[in-house]
Image (tube, rainbow, N blue to C red):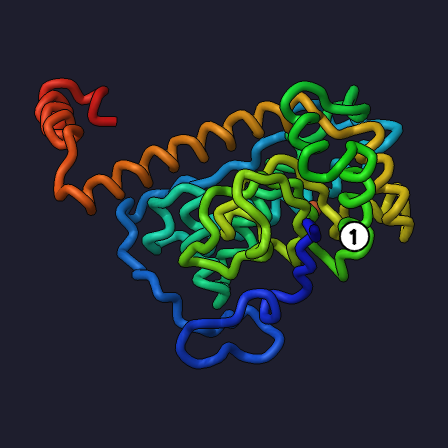
Amino acid sequence: METVATASLPCALFPRRGKGSPAAGGLASTRRFPYNESKRKCGAGKIAAKFELKPPPYSLDALEPHISQETMSYHWGKHHRGYVEGLNNQIVGTELESMDLEDIISRTYNKGNILPPFNNAAQIWNHDFFWESMNPKGGGKPSGSLLELIERDFGTFEKFTQRFITAASTQFGSGWVWLAYKANRLDVENAVNPCPSEEDKKLVVVKSPNAVNPLIWDYSPLLTIDVWEHAYCLDFQSRRNDYISTFMEKLVSWEVVSNRLEMAKARAAEREREEERRKQEEEHGSTPGDNEATEMYLDSESDESEAE
Ligand SMILES: [Fe+2]
């Protein structure tokens, strides 16, 4: 059973569904955004940056000798910072300004007809997730339910590792490789599912080009490696395979990946309950939960904390 999605180019993997076609080779910087540009609410005052550059959860020299402080300063301090500044500039005065990062990613992916803010927004999310995927004392092997699921879905941990390394070494050009927990929906409105033949509630290894990430497929990402050249060129030059092997053997934080898996499973379980509730509503017109919903609404008027 094939578990590596072979995404190559956005236009090949995600057929454009919007009206008209974008200019060849570009992200349609001149295309009109399908979201409203509103007047700035702050008048002539200074507009605070919506998003801030989040530092990695360790010092910039903490990953040495595997990833140098120089690489971290360049990668986080220049590239990651650039995505944050770029997005903040792009969303000022638009309705995106009031959205959180994940909503901006979903909105600007725009069914594969990518809008200019998407790349900056997704790259911010991807890099935050990448920094948190590593630990100076990482590497080794996972345990517990994560290891059990890896062995169920890939055969052995070693086979999974080889699958991940192969995907990362063969991603053409810039992009990312992910271990993700496939959510319990085969299709989403926003994107073409890269693993339509895979069963749900399963681990998959997925490649994504440029800034694309599994959120747009409604998968739950668990681990990622950045295979843009800027991630490894200072330390490994063109030896991408050495960078990938070092990441797997010395840097992956399996503790973080395990925690993400538990959250992903909880999310899937909650979705199942939602689906069941929706099904009951369709069959019976109403459910016992309707009365509870009314009570919660009434309570919320007297207790603002409940409303949130
Ligand atoms: Fe990067």
Q: Residue at x 70, y 51 (%)?
A: 1
Q: Please determine whether, in this image, residue 64 is positioned above or below residue 279.
A: above
Q: Residue at x 80, y 27 (%)?
A: 63
* Residue ID for mark 1: 229
Quarter that holds the C terminus: top left
Q: Residue at x 50, y 30 (%)?
A: 265
Indicate left or right for 8 with 170 as reference. left
Q: Position of residue 104 (x, y in %)?
A: 43, 50
Q: Position of residue 152 (x, y in %)?
A: 68, 34
Q: Residue at x 46, y 28 (%)?
A: 266
What is the number of callouts on the image? 1
Q: Please determine whether, in this image, residue 158 is positioned above or below residue 178.
A: above
**Badge 1: residue crowd in 10 Å (few <14, some 14–19, many ≥20):** some
Indicate left or right for 99 with 39 as reference. right
Q: Secondary structure at mark 1?
A: helix
Q: Splitting the image into 4 quarters, where does residue 259 fall? A: top right
Decide if residue 68 is in sight here: no
Q: Please determine whether, in this image, residue 297 is positioned above or below residue 50.
A: above
Q: Splitting the image into 4 quarters, where does residue 165 fall? A: top right
Of all residues, the one furthest to the front in this rendering is 283
User: What's the amino acid at mark 1?
Assistant: Glu
Front one among 288 and 253: 288
Front one among 6 and 56: 6
Indicate left or right for 211 with 243 as reference. left
Q: Position of residue 120 (x, y in %)?
A: 55, 52
Q: Please determine whether, in this image, residue 152 is positioned above or below residue 255.
A: below
Front one among 253 and 79: 253
Q: Position of residue 218 (x, y in %)?
A: 48, 47
